[in-house]
Amino acid sequence: MTSPFSSERLLFTPATPQADAIPLIFAFPNEYSVDITSLGYQVVWATLAARSDLDVARLFTDIHEPLPANPELLGFSMSWELDYVNILGVLESLEIPIWSRERSHSHPIVFGGGPVLTANPEPYAEFFDVFLLGDGEILLDAFVHAYQEVRHADRDTQLKHLARVPGIYVPSMYQVTYQSPDGAIASITPIDATIPAQVQKQTYRGNTLSASSVVTEKAAWENIFMVEVVRSCPEMCRFCLASYLTLPFRVADVEDSLIPAIEQGLTVTNRLGLLGASVTQHPEFESLLDHLNQHRFDDVRISLSSVRTNTVTEKLTRTLVKHDAKSITIAVESGSDRVRKIVNKKLETDEIVQAAVNAKAGGLNSLKLYGMVGIPGEESADVEQTVAMMRSLKKAAPGLRLTLGCSTFVPKSHTPFQWFGVNPQAEKRLQSLQKQLRSNGIDFRPESYNWSVIQALLSRGDRRLSKLLELTRHYGDSLGSYRRAFKELKGQLPDLNDYVFDRWTVDRVLPWSHLQGALPQSTLEKHMASSFPEPLAVGH
């Protein structure tokens, strides 16, 4: 059987490692076809592999390149919470202790990055030696340079040196005290005065954003060349990690960055993915569309990630249809104007209806919408408004296939809604939507409520969860497995309700209080207060 690596078409030139290059394994804790479709993984790998002072081997759960006998660095890119199970499996397969405290100088330094670990690394703190918080454009060079300075020192010296680099977080250099073994956090302090009290997430502010470094038919999105059009989102919906954690909103320079990247990518494939939380909000998106509408690109298939609803014009949809797109995706959050105001979604129902009309007029077959239940302040009547909105879309654009994907609100770190818990009524609200929408011929795709509970646990967890996660992996990733593990660890950490469902007070020490995101807590508190001019009852 031929290796998937042989199908890769590289868009960068890997360096030839020099004689004393640092042996490094770069892992993605999932299968090759999934991981090679991650733009973040591709870009980090290319950045590392282009350095002659590193000797990089890639590792996936189903395949790997020839691995060094004595790696000095082992990195993981993590973009899905439950992949921690695979990380522990990889460590065991390489005969590396899963607990960082049990590693010696003979073991590699285990580092991690990616959206999950930047948002809240604490549940995984006992498994990693180092976290890189923020954008790889800044952090990777700083990390490798700092490691080189202490490459031949003892492990404790290495970790202390790395902990002083902006954006590099070494959990063992911080002591967490608790009000009681199963109580709230009392304090998080560095172990000595040379370690910064807060680690600041690093933000790349340039206008050359990411683009694929490899195209392959073995990817889950076959032969796709991806280019990042925008980073972050200017809308700042109060629950949204993709916006708040990655601020400020940045756009790729069309003439000097985007178009040259696209031109290079289209020399090896005719499938193009335009990525970003809100790609159509690029100020020059129209001129990018005009460029792609040239006859020489007629055979190029274009995919867009989620777009802002009021930018769904007939021109946009006709362009997408011309380039083989069948549908478009918009995030509406709720059919209720009141709930959209709560979350700062600057969108009216008639704009959503117009997007559906434009999608059909432009020739698209279907429109995918993303919604959410259990948003703080939501009432049952707001859920009925979502049903009414979907019915009005069906009436306004007959024949257009409508799909509503719906999740449960999950509190995310570094957002104004981080203090709210999951609403236990969300499960019933998902069931109600399913019953009403499917009877109206609307495709309803709910995300698992139980998965949302696990997501919230990991989203708001502290480092005491590392023990729970290690226990849970042997039971499976069902909610029942987590409940069983909580029972076994009773008295050693707070209960599930505290992490998932309880409303936290703003004066509480958060698990990530020592990790500074894009905005200070005082700003997040103001944004939360702006959503609720009247104090919200604890039950919401």
Image (cartoon, rainbow, N blue to C red):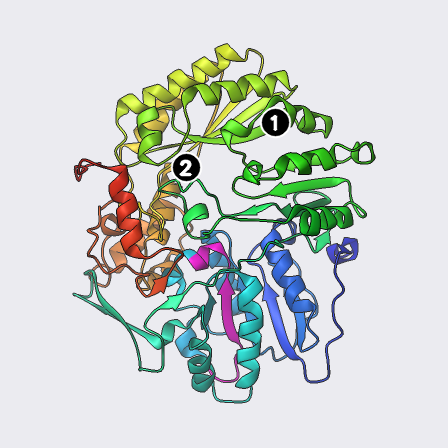
Residue 295, percent from left and from top: 82, 31
Q: What amino acid does circle 1 point to?
A: Ser
- At x 18%, y 35%, the residue is 534
Q: Quadrant of the N terminus?
A: bottom right
At x 36%, y 62%, the residue is 516
Q: Is residue 424 above or below residue 163?
A: above
Within 10 Å of disc 1 (Cα), the crowding (few <14, some 14-19, many 20+) is: many
Span shown in magenta: 104-118
Relative image position of residue 228 (x, y in whole percent): 61, 48
Quarter holding the C terminus? top left
**How far across and down, in percent of the image, does residue 356 sit?**
53, 20
- Asked whether the viewer can see residue 338, the reply is yes
Q: Is residue 116 magenta?
A: yes
| Badge 2 amino acid | Ser
Whether residue 137 is situated above or below residue 262 in the rendered picture: below
Which of marks 1 and 2 precedes in the sequence?
1
Tell me the tag on residue 327: 1
> On screen, 168 above or below 396?
below
Residue that mark 2 sits on: 448
Confirm whether the magenta stretch covers residue 448.
Answer: no
Q: Secondary structure at mark 2?
A: loop
Q: In terms of depth relative to the viewer, which is nearer, 33 or 507?
A: 507
